[in-house]
Image: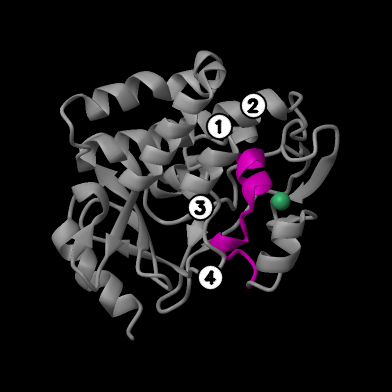
């Protein structure tokens, strides 16, 4: 699992990282027999069967790692049902809003939860979804000074708490953002945009890559865009890709 975290830590799953994972599984055959290692054996073998890992296989591996992380969190840190206050209208006032020229914001529901720590089993983190606050060190040291409602205030525990609540009827870009198990880069800023099919969520690119939550051929999800190189991660483009690159440039002028 630590290796998975490392692979996801940077912006793009690379062929070299998959070599590393494959070598680890070869050197530790036991790990390949049990979860989570066993998930990766077959896709890796298929990937290398033709001698080349192409971009769609890289994208597949990234999705697999994200799903594994979600499952791992459920196993290591299961949450008890259901601490949401009875009768509370969780969707009222819960929208990602933006005024012209302002950053996108999450107006969270008035709910506080205890979220089990996956790193320190047995301990909990206190999460407040209204203020997007957590007491973990990632939040305190990297996210606490971001303005109220800023998307990058979401640490893994806040994402976990939103997933646990399972708020329905969210805007699809927000749903996709909350379902992504990888917390956003705290240095990224977020804007809402519209390229003809509803609000999409775009970030700036402090390290080369913008995160784009938009609609694609398999539904809504996260896409990566390097607008300086006019390139989409894994050659996977969302709908309206041609309009999104100028939109990122316009929203985040350099
Ligand atoms: Zn946290």
The answer to which of marks 4 and 3 sits earlier in the sequence is: 3
N-terminal of the pair, mark 4 or mark 1, is: 1
Decide if residue 90 is in sight here: no
- Residue 88 vertical placement versus 207 (above, below): above
Residue corresponding to mark 4: 187
Residue for badge 2: 74
Between 102 and 58, the one nearer to me in the picture: 58
Q: In the image, is residue 155 part of the stretch drawn in magenta?
A: yes
Which residue is at a point 46% across and 76% down the rendered structure image?
Answer: 102
- Which corner quadrant of the image does residue 78 belong to? top right
- Among all residues in the image, which is located at the extreme front? 27
Image position, residue 18 (x, y; %) = 37, 39
Chief secondary structure of the magenta portion: helix
Marks 1 and 3 sit apart, C-alpha to C-alpha, by: 15 Å
Q: What residue does disc 1 label?
A: 70
To which residue does mark 3 refer? 9
- For the record, the magenta segment spans 147-162
Q: In the rendered view, would you say 253 is above or below 209?
A: below
Determine contact: label 3, label 2, CB under 8 Å.
no
Tell which tag, 3 or 2, sits nearer the viewer: 3
């Amino acid at each position: 699992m630590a290796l998975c975290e490392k692979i996801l830590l940077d912006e793009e799953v690379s062929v070299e990282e998959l070599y590393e994972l494959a070598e680890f599984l070869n050197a530790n055959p036991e790990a390949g027999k049990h979860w989570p290692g066993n998930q990766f054996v077959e896709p890796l073998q298929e990937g290398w069967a033709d001698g080349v890992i192409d971009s769609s296989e890289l994208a597949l591996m990234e999705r697999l790692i994200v799903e594994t992380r979600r499952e791992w969190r459920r196993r290591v840190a299961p949450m008890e049902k259901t601490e949401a206050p009875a009768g509370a209208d969780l969707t009222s006032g819960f929208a990602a809003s933006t005024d012209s020229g302002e950053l996108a914001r999450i107006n969270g529901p008035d709910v506080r939860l205890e979220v089990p720590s996956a790193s320190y089993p047995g301990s909990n983190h206190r999460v407040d979804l209204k203020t997007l606050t957590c007491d973990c060190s990632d939040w305190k040291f990297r996210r606490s000074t971001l303005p109220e409602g800023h998307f990058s205030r979401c640490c893994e525990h806040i994402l976990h708490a939103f997933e646990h609540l399972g708020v329905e009827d969210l805007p699809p870009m927000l749903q996709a953002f909350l379902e992504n198990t990888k917390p956003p880069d705290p240095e990224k800023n977020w804007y809402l945009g519209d390229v003809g099919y509803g609000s999409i969520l775009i970030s700036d690119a402090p390290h080369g890559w913008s995160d784009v939550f938009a609609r694609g051929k398999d539904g809504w999800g996260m896409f990566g865009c390097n607008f300086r190189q006019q390139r989409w991660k894994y050659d996977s483009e969302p709908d309206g890709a041609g309009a999104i690159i100028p939109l990122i440039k316009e929203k985040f002028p350099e």
